[in-house]
């Protein structure tokens, strides 16, 4: 259940990024757009699961020297890779360049964190 909830939160966050210039979700049918967002969310999750630990390990010194700001660059690159993989899989989702990916990844991080916090707060039992 937690995995499904995480994917749904990521879907909403990715959908919000499509309002940015350079991040496009094509399609006329709402169902097709939802399925595309689902696929892109799964791809983004897998890319983060596999490549982010490798990037953190290899770029450890850069993380320390930039006080963690290098993580924003890594997240942007991973979002850009997600857009590339979506293009390769013929999904109607496109990320046009690094800066669009950078801002898209930043928005995905902020929205995902906010939504996860809200869900966590709602799911907690209320104490009297």
Image (cartoon, grey):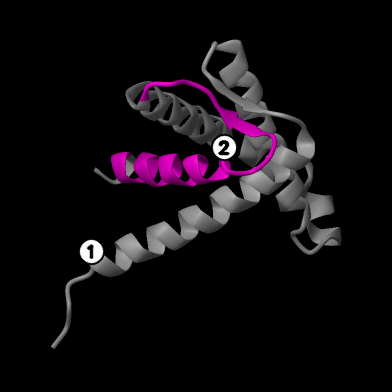
| Residue displayed at 62% across by 25% down | 94
Tell me the magenta residue range: 4-29
Q: Is residue 98 magenta?
A: no
x, y percent for residue 16: 51, 46
Please tell me the numbered disc located at residue 15: none
Q: Residues within 10 Å of mark 1 (few under 14, many from 20)?
A: few
**Residue assigned mark 1:** 123
Q: Secondary structure at mark 2?
A: helix
Q: Quick one: which residue is furthest to the bottom in this view?
A: 128
Residue 57 position in % (x across, y down): 71, 43
| Residue at x 72% of width, y 36% of height | 77
Instruction: Mark 2 or mark 1: name the one nearer the start of the chain.
Output: 2
Which of these two is toward me, 37 or 77? 37
State the image coordinates of residue 127 (x, y, percent, origin top left).
Answer: 17, 83
Name the residue at the front extreme.
Answer: 28
Q: Is residue 90 above or below residue 80?
A: above
Mark 2 lies on residue = 48
Q: For the residue labelled by badge 1, is the local secondary structure a helix, a strand or a loop?
A: helix
Point out the residue furthest to the left here. Answer: 128
Q: Is residue 49 above or below residue 84?
A: below
């Amino acid at each position: 259940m937690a995995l499904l909830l995480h994917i749904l939160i990521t879907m909403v966050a990715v959908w919000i990024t499509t309002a940015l210039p350079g991040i496009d979700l094509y399609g006329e049918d709402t169902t097709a757009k939802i399925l595309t967002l689902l696929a892109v969310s799964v791809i983004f999750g897998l890319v983060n699961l596999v490549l982010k630990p490798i990037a953190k390990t290899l770029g450890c010194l850069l993380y320390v020297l930039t006080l963690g700001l290098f993580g924003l660059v890594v997240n942007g690159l991973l979002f850009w890779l997600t857009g590339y993989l979506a293009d390769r899989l013929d999904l109607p989702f496109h990320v046009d360049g690094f800066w669009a990916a950078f801002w898209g990844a930043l928005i995905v991080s902020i929205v995902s964190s906010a939504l996860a916090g809200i869900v966590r707060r709602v799911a907690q039992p209320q104490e009297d």
